[in-house]
Each structure stands twice: as structure tokens, then as C-alpha cells.
Amino acid sequence: MVVDARPSHDRRSAVSLFARLRTAEGQADPFPYYARLRAMGPVTPAPWGNVLVTGFDLCDQILRSRDWLEPDKRWRDQQGAGTRWNAPSSQEMSNTLPALNPPEHTRIRRAAGTFGRKTLERIGRTVGRTTDRLLLSLTEQLRDGAADFVATVSEELPVATIGDWLGVPAADWPRLRELTHEQVFTQELLPTASQLARSDAATAELRAYFMDLVRRRREQPGDDPVSLWIHTFDTLEPDRERADESVYFLALFVLLAALETTSTLLSTMALRLLEQPLRWDLLAADPTLVPAFVEETLRHDPPTHVISRVAAHDTVVGDVEVAKDDMVHLMVGAAHRDPARHPDPDRFDPERARSDHLAFSNGIHYCLGAPLARLEAQTLLHHMISRLPRLTLAQRPTWEPRVAFRRLSNLDVALA
Ligand code: HEM
């Protein structure tokens, strides 16, 4: 049970704050709402009974601590039938890497492997070629007026990168991309019943797709990661069916993890670059600032604004008591603007002394794909400043009405 020592007006204002945060207008600039949330304290009870953490240091500590767990299958089952946690899409997610706790998490994470230097070099060549192709297409469209950077570039680069790496045919990429946009609702902060239904349908289609991919790779192995995972899980798991299921969950989650998040990073980065022409001047004059620009984008407005954990035992966060199995939402989008961590936090400044952030989480669940996301973002930014004519925003972009997973619906750009 959460001990709510705060006055009820705080709870009421938190309700109206989240109602507005969940709209497209709220998503266009969620930071004033976060500032109001932070004014209630670094830890505050959520209107729906969980706890919200907005302080950077507390979020960081919770992510790195063994006293906090992922909401795993056992926890989801406990929430009971009819809750969002028992929707088919949520149950399916409970088998994927970020919903596992040790020792199972340790076992599967080891089997998943990491992006080593050689793999990244190979993928890097594909990323370079794809980026060239996409920017050429953008330039051609710009001759006729404005073009949508999201549809032409930032939605395309991640699916081409991960699709090529997984060995998935290019003809399937558009459908897989659509399905990830639908599936993400089950991972949202407060999904509605209709959003969950869309997520359930997308999850079922993704299961059929990836189980078929695993079956085909078992019949005809190649040098792709799915074939490699089949080999690894065969050595860990004597039961073939269970080995195939494990490979399926890994492939499914890698796709889900890699697409929207990276697209949002690329779109937000382009928005930051174009909203102030001086930023383009700065990078063109000193391209060594490209990695810092990417990190500052991740701090200033990360693709994922909420990461959740449940208490392993009764504990206290800040001045709020949290009982075993209660959930806390780490509001990382807000924590990144915590003035106690980053001076003048609302200012976008790629030259700031530290841009440390929790965009890729921390601790044992630290994002496995962080090197790949950084590679894509840095390559795109380098190519933009060195190969494109000057661009400008044709109009303010619009945002999807969500809370946890940020997504720009469009970013119309034009020749400056
Ligand atoms: C900008 C892009 C990305 C962002 C912001 C991002 C963010 C995250 C976050 C916040 C987590 C941890 C969730 C938690 O702690 O509960 C995570 C985990 C993960 N990410 Fe990413 N991610 C990105 C790109 C990628 C890519 C490109 C891949 C794969 C190619 C990937 C694969 C994974 C995997 C496998 C995990 C699970 C790790 C674990 O639970 O041990 N991510 N990511």
C-alpha cells in the first residue's frame, strides 16, 4: 500500500495534468507539465495509485538497484483477469527480455549477445548507404516544396537497418513498421481498452510472422542473428519447441525495441537541428560535436519518457512508502530536466559539460541496442550537415497522443 501523505489538491492537479499530457498538444511540449509534477516533489503518488519519480538521482538509483524488479509474468498474473496486465499482448511481452528478472534475465541476455565492434562496422556500412539513399529521396521531394522528414527518413532508416540485419525481406518492412506502432500501446503508461485491442491484434500477427521466420531459419540456417540464436538456444534448451519460442521472443523484442525508439530519436534530433539555424552552423563548423548533439537530444527529450519497476520488498522512495509489488513510474523525460542534475535543464546545449541521461535505462536492463541507435543517429546527422542543402521547418510538427513512447507524426521540412 502506498502511504499518501500529500494533500488531495496535489492528486487532483496530477489527474488534470495527466489528462492534458496524454493529448497531442500536451505531447508537443510536455515539459511545463513535468515542471509542475516536479514541484510536487521528486516522488509523488500517481492519481491511479502508483508512484511517480521525477528526481534524476532517484530514477538512476532505482534502475541500478536489485531492490526493484521488472513487472514480470508472476507480477502480471497477480494483477488478475481483466486488468491491462493480463491482455494477450501484455502476457506476450512478459516473455521478452525487458520483462524478465534474474536469474532468467541473466541467462537470456547472455544468449542474446551484444553488438560487437565487427558487427557494428558491418552494419555501419549498410547504415551509410541507406542514409545516402534516403537523403537523396528527401532532396528530390524538396524540389517540389516541403517534404515529411519522418516518413522519408526517420521511419525508414531504423527498419532498413534492423530488417537487413535480421535478414527480413524488404517487402515486409512497411507492414512490420505499422505493426510496431500498434503493438507499442500495451507498453504505454495508461492504454485504453481499444488501444489494448489494437496491440493484441498486432502482437498476434507479429507472433505468426516471427514464428514462421524461426521455422524457416531452422530449415535453412544462414549467418544472420536468428540462425545464430537458434544455435545458441539449442545448446541451452533440450526441447526444440521451447528453444524456438525463446528465439521468437528475442527476435520480436529486438524489432519492437529498435524501430519506434530510434525513429523518434532521429526525428527529434532533426527538429532540434532545424528549429535554430545557429545549430546547423555550429555543427558544420565543428562536426566533432555530432556525438554530443545526439547525447543532448537524448537528454533533452528522450524517445521513452517512462520506465516502470515494482518493489521487491517494502521500501521507501524519497518520503513515500512503497509496499512490495507496488509499481513506480520513473518519469525519465522529467528527470532529465531535473535542475539538481543539469543546470539550466530546458536549454538544448550540445556543448554542456555533462549530458548524462537515462534514455537507454541503466543497470541490468541497459539497452542492448544503444550502440546501434547511436550509430544511426550520428551517421544521419553527419550526412545531413555535410551533404544536404540548408533545411528549415515548413511548420511545427505534430505528436502522437501518448505519454511513455514519444512519436512525431510528421516533420515537414523545406529548403531554407
Ligand atoms: C534511441 C533508440 C532506443 C532507445 C531510446 C531505447 C531505450 C531502451 C530502454 C529505456 C530500455 C530499458 C527498459 C527497461 O529498463 O525496462 C531498453 C532495453 C532494450 N533495448 Fe533499447 N532503445 C533504443 C534502441 C534499441 C535498438 C536499436 C535495439 C536493438 C537493436 C534495442 C534493444 C533493446 C533490448 C534487447 C533491450 C532489453 C534489455 C534488457 O532488458 O536486458 N534498443 N531500450
Image (spheres, rainbow, N blue to C red):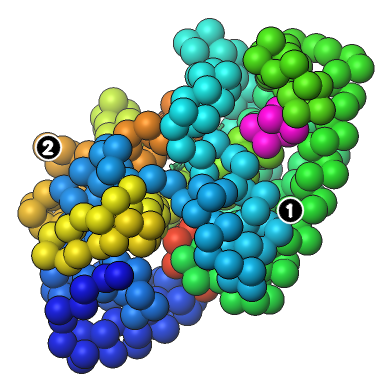
Q: Which element carries disc 2, helix, strand or loop?
A: loop
Identify the residue at horizontal 53%, vertical 60% (top origin).
78
Kindly report which numbered mark, 1 or 2, lies closer to the viewer in this rendering.
1
Residue 62 at x, y percent in the picture: 26, 46
Identify the residue at horizontal 77%, vertical 47% (top origin).
206
Q: Amino acid at mark 1?
A: Thr
| Left or right, 341 with reference to 276 | left
Residue 215 at x, y percent in the picture: 87, 27
Identify the residue at horizontal 38%, vertical 45% (top origin).
69
* Magenta segment main secondary structure: helix
Disc marking residue 353: 2
On the question of residue 224 being in view, the answer is no
| Left or right, 3 with reference to 304 | left
| Left or right, 303 with reference to 99 | left
| Left or right, 163 with reference to 119 | right
Disc marking residue 203: 1
Q: Is residue 248 magenta?
A: yes
On screen, residue 31 above or below 167: below
Q: From which residue to which does the magenta span run?
A: 245-250
Which image quarter is the C terminus in? bottom left
On screen, residue 47 above or below 106: below
Which image quarter is the N terminus in? bottom left
On screen, residue 297 above or below 158: below
